[in-house]
Image (tube, helix red, strand yellow):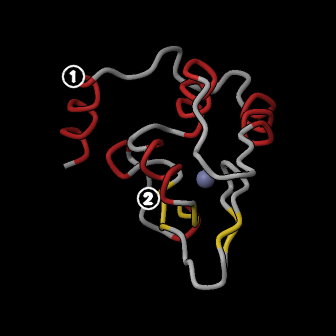
Amino acid sequence: MYICPYCGHRGRESQTGEEEHIIPLIRRGSDESRNKLIACEKCNAAKGRKTPAEFAKWVEATNWKPRWPNADMRPFLKAQKAKSKASLPRKSLGKRELMQIHGRQR
Ligand SMILES: [Zn+2]
């Protein structure tokens, strides 16, 4: 049983959810437990390589939400807005920039 931190979906007893990296590994996130949480598979798939801030922006721009009966992205969006005053990249990274970051990691 888990509650998805993005959409609030409650997984049933038998459902374990998916391990999700808050900051994706490819974006220099760590593989430690403090960078991980359990999310529903729909949010995990949709978030992909985005940071939480980018995911929030994308959710707002596309009005995305997972098709759970009670999915609600608003608390997540609100929390992101409150958090994200200055420290975030001004624009989402393109594929080329992602590759550069990835390259620098090694
Ligand atoms: Zn979710």
Tell me where residue 11 sits by quadrant. bottom right
Q: Nearer the viewer, residue 31 or 74?
A: 74
Q: Amino acid at mark 1?
A: Arg
Q: In percent of the image, x 37 and y 23: which residue is there? A: 93
Q: Secondary structure at mark 1?
A: helix
Residue bearing the label numbered 1: 96
User: Percent from the top left, x then y, of residue 4?
Assistant: 66, 59
Please tell me whether residue 97 is drawn above or below residue 19 in the rendered image.
above
Horizontally, is 102 left or right of 55 in the view?
left
Please tell me whether residue 70 is drawn above or below residue 10 in the rendered image.
above
Q: Which mark is residue 17?
A: none
Q: In percent of the image, x 71 and y 66: which residue is there? A: 10
User: Percent from the top left, x then y, of residue 35?
Assistant: 54, 60
Determine if the C-beta at disc 1 is less than 8 A from ligand 1: no
Q: Which mark is residue 30?
A: 2
Q: Amino acid at mark 2?
A: Ser
Distance from label 2 to label 1 (Cα)?
Answer: 21 Å
Please tell me whether residue 13 is drawn above or below residue 100 in the rendered image.
below
Quadrant for the N terminus in the image? bottom right
Q: Residue furthest top?
A: 90
User: Percent from the top left, x then y, of residue 99?
Assistant: 21, 32
Q: Nearer the viewer, residue 68 or 54?
A: 68
Q: Nearer the viewer, residue 70 or 91?
A: 70
Q: Secondary structure at mark 2?
A: loop
Q: In percent of the image, x 53 and y 63: which residue is there? A: 36
